[in-house]
Amino acid sequence: MVRNNRSVLDLLYGNYTFVNPVLANHYGIPGVTGKPGQPGKSKEDDWVRVDDAGKYERGGLLPMAVFLTQSSPGLRTSPVKRGYWVVRRLLGEVIPPPPPQVPELPQDEAKTDAPLRDVLAQHRSNPQCAGCHARFDVFGLAMEGYGPVGEARTKDLAGRVIDASATFPGAFHGSGFRGVQAYIKEKRQQDFLDNISRKLLSYSLSRSLQLSDDPVVAQMKTRMRATGYRFGSLVETIVTSRQFLNRRRPESPRLQSAH
């Protein structure tokens, strides 16, 4: 996306993915065998682009196994962690930490008496937990069509049929990762664009943002819209900004050692 100056919205809605033979097998994508290995390089190092990835329940960041797996504790999924990852990392929401002594959820999905959806419903009955969980659990519940290591599935580890339906904030109904995509596109796309602008600007300036940086963020979003949300418009706005041109240079190692 960066190298080809594509739209940043491809991170959310792109109908393509990249796989090597091992990941293709995990995703259920046929015909990816890799080129004959070169010296010091195996077939598994050969990554290819797969278009029309939606028919394999892939495309964009949301259904990438790496993110689904890092938000799972091992023997079960975690709608809480997956949902939190979406609203915190993609949409930029700041969620307060959980209260102390939060009861642990079961560790093995195969040994629960009810689906995680029902277990979480009981957890949210605690008023201390309900407010925050209402902001992100639904995103994780919609992604229950993926197992603990991001494999597409129709049943959980106990053999129960998966229910990936969700009612998002604002009574928006959807199901699966396409439901999450549709909700973000309809209700939260501006949050995503604001978040990626702020993250990239903060990275470029090597510091946390301040109120005085808000005009640059606004300019980044305006220029993005005018260029079809191309990544290059973000970079151009940053490198021509007063903040970037006048940022403080880090001390050289020689000066640091002199101190």
Image (tube, grey):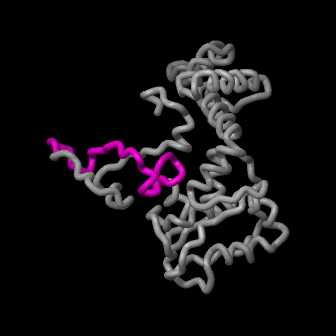
Instruction: In this rendered view, identify the residue nearer to me: 207 or 166.
Output: 166
- The residue closer to the viewer here, 199 or 51, is 51
Residue 190 found in image quarter: top right
Viewer-proximal residue, 39 or 91? 91
Q: Residue at x 61, y 86 (%)?
A: 113
Residue 38 to residue 144: above or below: above
Q: Within the image, what quadrant is residue 196 found in?
A: top right
Above or below: residue 1 compared with residue 183? above
Q: Is residue 173 magenta?
A: no
Q: Residue 28, position in %: x, y?
A: 35, 61
Q: Position of residue 131 (x, y in %)?
A: 81, 61
Q: Residue at x 55, y 84 (%)?
A: 111
- In the rendered image of this protein, does residue 206 appear above or below residue 163? above
Q: Quadrant of residue 134?
A: bottom right
Q: How many marks?
A: 0
Image: magenta residue range: 37-66
Q: Is residue 259 visible?
A: no
Q: Looking at the image, which residue is at 54% across and 64% down?
A: 72
Verify whether residue 55 appears in magenta.
yes
In the picture, measured across the screen, residue 155 lies left or right of residue 92, that is left
Residue 239 visible in the displayed image: yes
> Residue 108's spot in the image, x, y percent?
54, 78
Residue drawn at 53 percent across, 66 percent down: 145
On the image, the x and y values in percent for residue 136 come to 70, 58
Q: Point out the residue furthest to the right here.
A: 127
101 vs 24: above or below: below
